[in-house]
Amino acid sequence: MMKLNADHYFTGKNRHRPCEDYAVSGTEPVPYAILADGCSASPGSHTGAMLLALSARREVRRIFRRGAAQSVPDYEALGRAVIRRAARMARLADLPETALDATLMTAFVTAETVIVHAYGDGFIIAKRRGKPDLCVAEIRYETNAPYYLSYQTDRARNRRYGVEMDGAKVIQCDGESLRVGYDAPVCYRFPVREFSLVALASDGLASFADKIAPEKGLIPATDMIREFTAFRNFNGQFVRRRARRAVTTCEKRGVVSTDDISVAAIYAEEETP
């Protein structure tokens, strides 16, 4: 038997008002963890990120209610359903078309497997049972301009992105880099019998710097990932407890983030009979 828990955390920094990250998590009808990271150059993305995350949560709940789903939701179909619902909500709120320019990352459990879908940039983190090291995949773009689901709602913007931002998506995992098309699907599967933890994080974990010694540059993202996932236990709000402690510890050392931060995670614990 497996005991599953999910939790999340997000916070803004003075440089960004309001916070452009948003995250949600839960365990019904299946464990899920979702985060969205709004584009700072796009007006209204702080609200758009929230709409995307809530739309994704609604879609996951719809798919899995009463155990109806017997297969993994399709990457493209899930993305389309989420952005269409979010776009409707954005129109009702009279938001600009740019409001939904945001990364979306989802994780949910089905058939004893954590499925991760990533639409944009960020980090996917996993820990094998009995192993001390983390498996980390960083998703970034050569043009430093992620391809967002929102481009699918506007043909002109979609075409313009393909012309002006004609660069590959780069997935870097354990020292190896893979270049794929900017709109290529990113989907990972982590069997819970093999992996005890699967976490998502926005690129804010790559924005920490030492304000006492700025010449050192940015702190390696892997260092911050270890800091934010050094969980003492996995009960209750385990992500929030660890993240708040990590932020406090870093600030005491003079290490601060220049970006918003969001983390969401699913933990699977083997129950002893």
Image: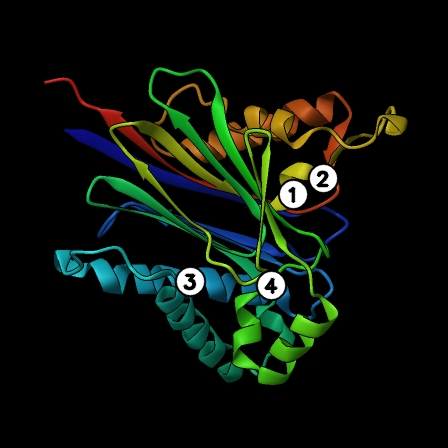
Q: Where is 25 relative to 209, above or below?
A: below
Residue named by callout 3: 54
Q: Where is 165 relative to 214, above or below?
A: below
Mark 4 and mark 1 in contact (Cβ < 8 Å)?
no
Residue 159: x and y in percent read 63, 79
Given the image, on which type of amino acid does mark 4 rest?
Tyr
**Left/right of residue 266 with respect to residue 11 in the rendered view:** left
| Quadrant assignment, res 235 | top left
Residue named by callout 1: 204
Query: How many numbered discs sit on the rendered protein?
Result: 4
Q: Residues within 10 Å of mark 1 (few under 14, many from 20)?
A: many
Alpha carbon separation for disc pair 4 and 2? 20 Å
- Whichever of labels 4 and 2 marks the residue nearer the N terminus, that label is 4
Q: Residues within 10 Å of mark 2 (few under 14, many from 20)?
A: some
Of badges 1 and 4, the one in the foreground is 4
Of badges 1 and 3, the one in the foreground is 1
- Whichever of labels 1 and 3 marks the residue nearer the N terminus, that label is 3
Residue 109: x and y in percent read 27, 45
Q: Secondary structure at mark 3?
A: helix
Residue named by callout 2: 207
The dot on residue 147 is 4
Residue 32: x and y in percent read 33, 48
Alpha carbon separation for disc pair 3 and 4? 20 Å
Alpha carbon separation for disc pair 1 and 4? 17 Å
Quadrant in the picture for the N terminus: top left
Given the image, on which type of amino acid does mark 2 rest?
Ser
Mark 3 and mark 1 in contact (Cβ < 8 Å)?
no
Q: Secondary structure at mark 4?
A: loop
Alpha carbon separation for disc pair 2 and 3? 26 Å
Mark 2 and mark 1 in contact (Cβ < 8 Å)?
yes
Alpha carbon separation for disc pair 1 and 3? 21 Å
